[in-house]
Image (cartoon, rainbow, N blue to C red):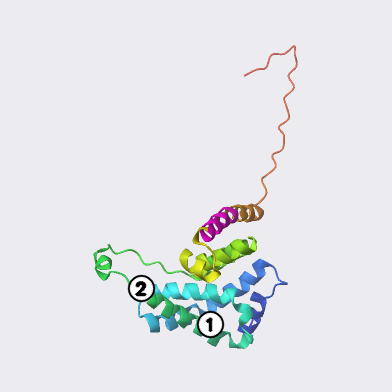
Amino acid sequence: MEKNDILVINARNQNLSVGQRHLAFGELVNRFYDVAYRWAYAVLEDRHQAQDAVQEAFVVAFQSLDQLRDPLAFAGWLRQIVVSQAYRQMRGQFVDSSSIEAAPELPAYEPGPAAILEEVEMKERVMTAVQALPEKEQIVTQLFYINGYSQYEIARLLELPLTTVKKRLQYARRNLKGIMVSMVDSFAPPEPVLAPIPARHIHPSKPESY
């Protein structure tokens, strides 16, 4: 069985195929999911919020693997990400408790390693699509959709008119749609080629029987 540091090295090795990298990271998710959940639950003391924090933490970890200098330090590095996401989750949970108490009980959803890896793959594709945008559209898209800035904040940050920011986001959405469609088409299996059906030859002197 491969050691954790080998899995980390493989998960961020750009010379390997995407499938091989995801396979290595999926094994890390399998190994660390339970302890990551305990780290998150210790902060949040809520099962659902802890699951959300862990899922997001693994996505962040995969996207930030290149920042981990020592693969042997993966466990401690991951713990910092999980705890950070847990506190971020805590800060975002300012909701009306009365509406929650009045809501019907829903079955619990527990994301497993497969669901986390699927989200990692999807976010990786989205980031690839964003990076394919023109530079001006790429900047406003990352600030708005990834960093969570409002359009007004982006305008102030980039010293641009608000209308320019809105227009760039509009163009970016249109271009992203085309890029994502192209990416999906490139991953789709080829259409099956149907063999032509030979025509039946009927002798002119003999009527066809039914």
Region in magenta? 164-176
Indicate the position of residue 153 as horizontal and vertical percent values: 47, 69
* Dominant SS type (magenta): helix
Q: Which mark is residue 78?
A: 1
Q: Is 88 or 104 nearer to us in this picture?
A: 88
Asked if residue 170 lies in the magenta stretch, the reply is: yes
Q: Is residue 202 above or below residue 28?
A: above
Q: Secondary structure at mark 2?
A: loop
Q: Quadrant of the N terminus?
A: bottom right
Indicate the position of residue 162 as horizontal and vertical percent values: 50, 61
Q: Determine crowd level at label 2: few under 14, some 14-19, many 20+ residues with C-alpha closer than 10 A.
A: few
Q: Secondary structure at mark 1?
A: helix
Asked if residue 158 lies in the magenta stretch, the reply is: no
Quadrant of the image occupied by residue 104: bottom left
Q: Circle 2 sits on which residue? A: 93
Give the residue at x 47% y 81%: 84
* Residue type, mark 2 in image: Gln
* Residue type, mark 1 in image: Leu
Name the N-terminal-most of marks 2 and 1: 1
Q: Is 76 or 90 nearer to us in this picture?
A: 90
Q: Quadrant of the C terminus?
A: top right
Of discs 2 and 1, which sits in the foreground?
A: 2
Indicate the position of residue 37 as horizontal and vertical percent values: 44, 79
**Does residue 14 appear to the left or right of 59 in the view shown?**
right
Q: Is 5 or 89 nearer to us in this picture?
A: 89
Give the residue at x 69% y 39%: 194
